[in-house]
Amino acid sequence: MKRSPTTRRLLWLFVIVGIAATDCIRLQSPHDNFMDIMGRRVGQNINDPHLLRAGFADPRFLLSVKELAAGHKELEYRHRGACSYFFEVDEKGTIVAWHYKGPDTDCIIVP
């Protein structure tokens, strides 16, 4: 079957757009997404309203506060299931580090 030049160009266009679209979509596991999103909180202020609105520093989920060396604090938050995450916050309220505790199956944010 012979196709017209216009039809061939359209087919090539669909192929190129399809490849570009699938290349742009980053398939990420829910746990990897959790790790990326939480890692981006480092450097932000714990009192930032965006953190509160997103639920990352919501006082309702705060489980404990522990005093650390050099005036830092470790704030433990409940996430889901058996997962908790911890923000290390300096004296100015800046998140300087974070880590989590719990199974990878609970420490997730669905992309």
Image (cartoon, rainbow, N blue to C red):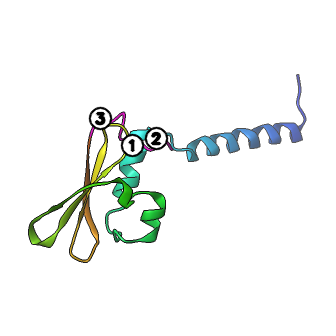
Q: Is residue 86 left or right of residue 28?
A: left
Q: Callout 1: 10 Å neighbours few (<14), some, many (20+)?
A: some
Across and down, in percent, residue 45 comes to: 34, 71
Q: Residue at x 29, y 71 (%)?
A: 94
**Circle 3 sits in a helix, a strand or a loop, which is it?**
loop
18 lies above or below 43 = above
Amino acid on which the number 1 mark rests in the picture: Asp
What label sits on residue 103 in the rendered view? 3
Write down the residue under mark 2: 28
> Does residue 7 appear anywhere in the picture?
yes
Across and down, in percent, residue 58 comes to: 39, 60
Q: Main secondary structure of the magenta part?
A: loop
**Circle 1 sits in a helix, a strand or a loop, which is it?**
helix
Across and down, in percent, residue 10 comes to: 82, 41
- Do residues under tags 1 and 3 come within 8 Å of each other at their CB atoms? no
Question: In the rendered structure, does residue 74 fall within the stretch colored magenta?
Answer: no
- Cα separation, mark 1 vs mark 3, equals 13 Å
Which portion, as a residue range, is magenta?
102-111
- Do residues under tags 2 and 1 come within 8 Å of each other at their CB atoms? yes
Amino acid on which the number 2 mark rests in the picture: Gln
Q: Nearer the viewer, mark 1 or mark 3?
A: 3
- Cα separation, mark 2 vs mark 1, equals 6 Å
Across and down, in percent, residue 80 comes to: 38, 41
- Cα separation, mark 2 vs mark 3, equals 17 Å
Q: Earlier in the sequence, mark 2 or mark 3?
A: 2
Amino acid on which the number 3 mark rests in the picture: Pro
Q: Callout 2: 10 Å neighbours few (<14), some, many (20+)?
A: few
Q: Residue at x 17, y 68 (%)?
A: 72
Question: In the rendered structure, does residue 108 fall within the stretch colored magenta?
Answer: yes
- View extreme (bottom): residue: 92
What label sits on residue 32 in the rendered view? 1
